[in-house]
Image (cartoon, helix red, strand yellow):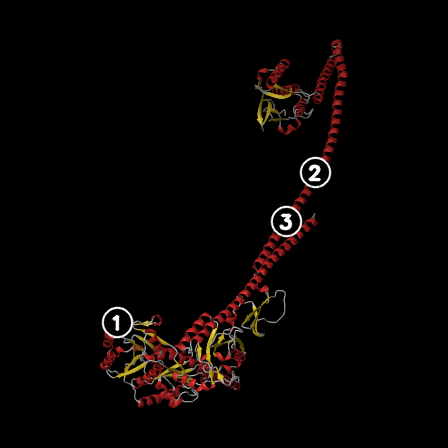
Amino acid sequence: MQNSSAAVCFLSRVFAFLLLLMSFTVSTVKADSADGIKKCLLVFSYHKGYEWNDGIDKGVTQRLEGICELKKIYLDTKRNQSVAFGKAAGLKAKQVIDEYKPHVLIAADDNASRYVVEPFYKNTSLPVVFCGLNWTASEYGYPYKNATGMVEVAPIVPLLKNIQRSIDIVKQGVYLSSDVITEHKDFLRYKKEYNDRGVDLNPVFVSTLDQWKAAYLDAQSADFIIINNNAGINNWEKSAVIDFVGKHSQTLTVTNYRWMMSYAMLGMTKDPVEQGRWAGDVASAILDGLPVENIPITINKSWHLFVNQKLIQAAGVTLSNRILNYAYKTW
Amino acid sequence: MHRKSKSTLVGILIAGVFFSLLLSGLMLRYELTKVQGAFANSVNQSTERVKKNLQDFVSADDQFRFLFQVNEDVSEDDFLVFSQTMVSQLPYTEEIIYAPKIRSSHITLEEKKFQRKGYTGFRFRPFLAQQAIETQFPDIIFPVKLIQPYTPYTSVWLGRDLLTFRVAQAVLFDVVSFGKKMQIVFSDDGRNKRFYAFSAVSFVSENQQNGQVLASNIFGVIGYELDLIGLLAESYNSNISRNITLNGRTIINEVAGTGESFFLMAQVDTIDFEGQTFNLRYQLPNALSNIDFRIPALILLMFLLVTLLVYFVVNNYIERQKILDNQNRVIEDQVKQKTRLLKEQATQIQKAFYHQLSVSKELESFSYSISHDLRAPLRSISGFANMLNEDYRDQLDDEGRDMLSRIEKGAEKMSILIDDLLTLSKISRRDFNTVHFSMSKLVNNQVAELCNTHSLKCNIIDVEDDLYADADRNLVRIAINNLLTNAIKYSAKAESPVVAFGATEKDGKRVFFVKDNGVGFDMRYANKLFIAFQRLHGSEFEGTGIGLAIVQRIMLRHGGKIWAESEAGKGATFYFTLS
């Protein structure tokens, strides 16, 4: 009787030991898998479906596929432009970030830095990679010791070079755009760079389509017209404008926005995918051990060159062969 | 013979193995020569490729420097296009940078230019702590402005002052102080091996004296990070080890140890490059491992097999020859033994023959002498018996006359016996004369003679016509006479006696026969027929018992033979051949 109880006791101890060993093994495996997978979190300023936003998403996703587990947050501040909404969205994003505990935080476009990075992660231990910041990152207090990224710069000077390659006399141009603050800022940059190169640039900011059409007709006497963003012209009708410019264009029209290529002859546009790729590459390098402070804040390096062949022919404008050869997409 | 065969076989083996080894060795030598040729060719190609790479690199650098010389401010776009072109043409170029010369007083201004472009927080900086060294030019800096390809890893160079770059400071000193066109420096931090090349960009072209430009005219430096293996060109044959040094400093050392071996192949080439010296030592540590042994081995194997084949063929031939020799020897021995036996037998036969001959002669002589000598007393007995019968017959009583008559008959019988004996003895002694004659005619003549002599019924004898023979006619006549006499005698008591003479064929030979339907005889006693004085019948038939012995002797003298077939009471047939 004593022997049998001793045997049961021994077996129960062995069983307990095996259970303990198994539980330890399982927990170790879980811990390893949890530690082994790097996590990245991408905060978008805008919403899914917005072309620029999706371009960045494409670039980041391409570069981080297989490198880290990528979680995405959309602040949706394009459709909800109030500061209060932005701050609320930023706070909500912070909660998600703190819960998710990413190894790298990627902030796409201005509002992600404005509402998330600057208030919550400036000079913290969390590496931050931003992208799509217009013209300068200093507006949001950059540089931080824990942040780097790519600033979004419009190809102002290259665009001027292409204008000069296309027409003989480049002395006076018109800057035609919607009457919003961003466009005013952009104009100042254009004006400085162009004035430095001996070109006079006159601004025309409009709020309605009729104003835009009238300004367009008046600008036909200029050497060239920069057609910048139409965002802010609420009664914009795409087909009507296409028809209008097709009938009344006489001088070279250029733009820095891809979606304005339906109305302009020559376009040099920023590439959101480049922004996303750079952010992905930098995040990957940080995960690989490259200190974030060693990576300088940089600007976008490549642009897409577009030509609206139909509009050029309608207006009778001649572009240089170099542009026609290098433009990889024509309307 | 055995020793000779063995030495032949050993000779074949030795010669075969020697020949196989010789051919295989020659093939091996040829293969080694091929390896040597391939080694030299590969090494020369490798060196030429390195030279070409360096020349191409210098040429591309010239073009690149020209770009900066003719453009005061090379844009990032232009730099991108040119550097991408260069990288595509010189794939071993991993990174290209451009660093303009900036005076200390202009640093802030230049930094603001960068910042205005969008490079937020941009500052000119020395290299990272572990890479940096204090600059030797406090008044100027060469910050990296353009980088291609621009990646997070290469971006760390942006704004770094090249003059603080520890690895390259010495050569950069030469470049910016003396305007040296191209200086290469090798960096090995234990983890990575890299080549850095730096080239000065100046406002004016190089002066004509020393190929250098004035330091004051230099406005920038182009730098390259190069793929070491790509630039030095991998050997075509991965088995070749290389030891490459630049200005005495080892860059690549794939040569394990310095031991020399018999099969070591080595070649040293030197390349002078812009005042610097590349020393390229190639070696093939173990040429044997590069030799294709298949053909030599195949030749060795093939000829060894041929040798073995020849060995076995010759061995087989020798073995068969041995067997034949042994068989011949046995046969010779047997022949010798047989010959000896035959000789012995011949000698014995000869002896026996001569003995028999002498005995026979003696016997014949004796028989003749007896017969001849007995005739005289017999004649006296017979004569006196006749005289007694004629002169004193009346004086004798019946018993006396009967006795006298018996004496006369005995003498007559004895006379006949003596005549037969003489005939028998004469058969062997008389001359033998073969002629072609008609047997049928001879038999008919004998029948006629017998008919006249014995008053026989001649009409009962049937003789086959047109039978011929080549024989001694007189002897044959004696034989026929005896055979016909016997036939007539033993068939005389038959109810219808018939005697026939004819011929038949047996085993391709002509066989004559004399046939009767007389008393015949029992075949059990046939062996006694031809023995002298042996008689199968009693006194009812007269005879001496010598006739058939005479016939047999005649046949034997002709080389023929005689035999008889009979059944008691049913006649007998005597067959004979004459040759």
Q: Picture coordinates of residue B238 (x, y %)?
A: 54, 67
Residue where numbered disc 3 is placed? B314
Residue type (three-letter) at the residue carrying disc 3: Val
Q: Is residue B543 among the parts visible in the rendering?
A: yes
Q: Earlier in the sequence, mark 3 or mark 2?
A: 3
Up the image or down, B413 lies above or below B269; here it is above
Tag of residue B338 = 2
Locate the C terminus of chain B and report the quarter of the image it occupies.
top right
The residue carrying pointer 3 sits among few (fewer than 14), some (14 to 19) or many (20 or more) residues within 10 Å by Cα, namely some
Residue type (three-letter) at the residue carrying disc 1: Ala
Up the image or down, B314 lies above or below A121; here it is above
Tag of residue A314 = 1
Mark 1 element type? helix
Residue A104 is drawn in which quadrant?
bottom left
Distance from label 3 to label 2 (Cα)? 34 Å
Q: Picture coordinates of residue A313 (x, y %)?
A: 27, 70
Q: Nearer the viewer, mark 3 or mark 1?
A: 1
Judge from the rendering whether residue B107 lies leftward or rightward of residue A303; answer left or right.
right
Residue A41 is drawn in which quadrant?
bottom left
